Image: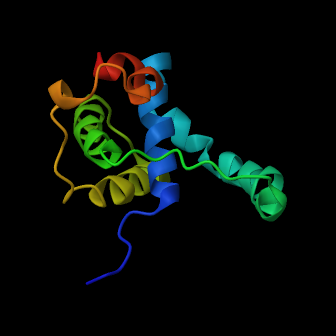
Amino acid sequence: DGRRVINTQDIRLCRRTLRDAAARGRSPEKTLAMWDRVLDGETRYIKGFKTTADFLLDTSFTYELGLISRLLGIVRRQFTLEGHNAELWDETARRFEHVVPLDLELLPADSMLREFYGSAVK
């Protein structure tokens, strides 16, 4: 219907949560508990300067949504969340339910996403 289902904030939350789980062994609960502070930092130190930046860098990959969809399924089976964070996590993950999960075999060997998502894609 032309509306945006997955926004950039959803992608950033998933990136951070999946990276923390894979690289730091941190539960989604701990990452989500810090999310409000992350958003506050973005507002205070990034968004206000976007209009005066010399250039903006697009860090998206066309196949990243499929990768996130695949990894969300794995991480959601590993961790159980409760309360407000569980609602946020489930709501965000539901947005990816209609995205076809990427077969990890198709992820290019030299993809920067391998470095970012760490052991989750090795």
Vertical order, 120 against 69 (above or below)? above
Outermost residue on the front side: it is 54
Display colour scheme: rainbow
Report whether 34 appears left or right of 103. Answer: right
Say above or below: 53 vs 109.
Answer: below
Q: Residue 38: x percent and y percent?
A: 67, 46
Q: Is residue 25 visible?
A: no
Give left or right: position of 26 versus 49. left
Return the x and y of residue 16 as percentages of the image width and height.
Answer: 51, 37
Identify the residue shown where x is 52% and y is 57%.
9
Taking depth in this image into account, of 49 and 44 the one nearest to the observer is: 49
Residue 106's spot in the image, x, y percent? 18, 30
Q: Residue at x 53, y 33 (%)?
A: 30
Assign the N terminus to one quadrant of the image. bottom left
Which residue is pictured at 35% across the width and 80% down the height? 3
Q: Nearer the viewer, residue 60 or 17?
A: 60
Outermost bottom residue: 1
Asked if residue 71 shows in the view, the reply is: yes
Check the picture and name the quadrant holding the C terminus. Answer: top left
Toward which corner of the image does residue 97 lie, by quadrant? bottom left
Residue 81, position as x, y percentages in the image: 38, 41
Residue at figure coordinates x 32%, y 32% from the top left: 79
Q: State the count of labels.
A: 0
Which residue occupies the foreground of this view, 107 or 4? 107
